[in-house]
Amino acid sequence: SSVRGEQFDRKYLDQAFTAAGISHTIVNAQGDPSTQRTQAEQAITNGAKVLLLVDLDPGSGAAIISVAHQKGDKVIDYDRLTLGGGADVYVSFDNTRVGQLQGHGLVKCIQQQGISKPVVAELNGDPGDNNATLFANGYNSVLKSLYTSGTLAKGPNQSVPKWDNQQALTIFEQMLQQTGNKINAVLAANDGLANSVISAETARKLKYVPVTGQDATAAGIQHILAGQQCMTVYKAVKKEAAAAAKVAVALVKGTTPP
């Protein structure tokens, strides 16, 4: 259900498989695990030899991998690791590093604005998404010592189920309510969550505080140019898609992936 999946991954994967002469289908479950399971089973029935899977949660992802392996098919975990799933190959970014960049970016923005002992709220990604865990490991490795030293004050900290921007808006509004609007910076795990923070600030006519992002979406870049968002992390989706396609093609042909 992310903007990135439809606008970028689909296009780049399609181009790579077409160039390699590999027949393929690309389907989107729009965030519904049962739909994704049905799509996977249909692909296997239609003769798929390799599944490129972005799991929606570890349980449903592991079930799909199990069905594929029972049929002798290979599975690539794409972008997100299916914990306990046992996929044959995992292709992703260094997600801990992404989180570290967010942490360092937020600290830099706070310093540039001269905010003393700011209260920092954290809007984490979906608790069922291993990437969200890795992002948090990254930014918390940067922020933890600053919380301990008192340079930063740790404010409300909450995960956003399914990365849902509407839920993120509700959660952040509750954070503002709890603190009497006394939040001076926000570690938001991606641009969509950052947009929810900015929407809440706009609705309440509050000063825009440093807020992080990730994915370099059009909206995220616009917010940065408008001074409403502090930073984002650009991830080269085309490189990730190309790497996954190379692996998939090798598995289809029965050769060892690069």
Image (tube, rainbow, N blue to C red):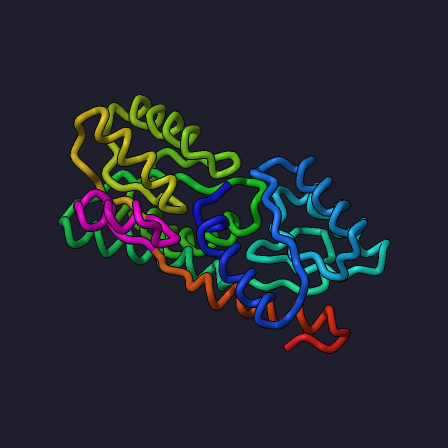
Which residue appears at 24% of the width and 47% of the height? Answer: 222
Which region shows up in magenta?
213-232
> Which residue appears at 22% of the width and 49% of the height?
224
Q: What's the residue at 66%, 51% (across, down)?
A: 83
Residue 138 at x, y percent in the picture? 44, 56
Residue furthest toward the left?
114
Residue 141, image x and y in percent? 42, 56
Q: Which quadrant of the figure contains the C terminus?
A: bottom right
The quarter of the picture where residue 92 lies is: bottom right
Q: Depth check: give the residue in front, 154 or 85.
A: 85
In the rendered view, would you say 168 is above or below 125? above
254 left or right of 138?
A: right
Residue 216 magenta-drawn?
yes
Q: Picture coordinates of residue 122 (x, y %)? A: 38, 40
Asked whether residue 111 is drawn in magenta, I would say: no
For this view, does 98 lie left or right of residue 26?
Answer: left
* Image position of 91 with respect to 162: above or below: below
* Prevalent SS, magenta region: loop
- Residue 71 rendering spot, x and y as whole percentages: 85, 55
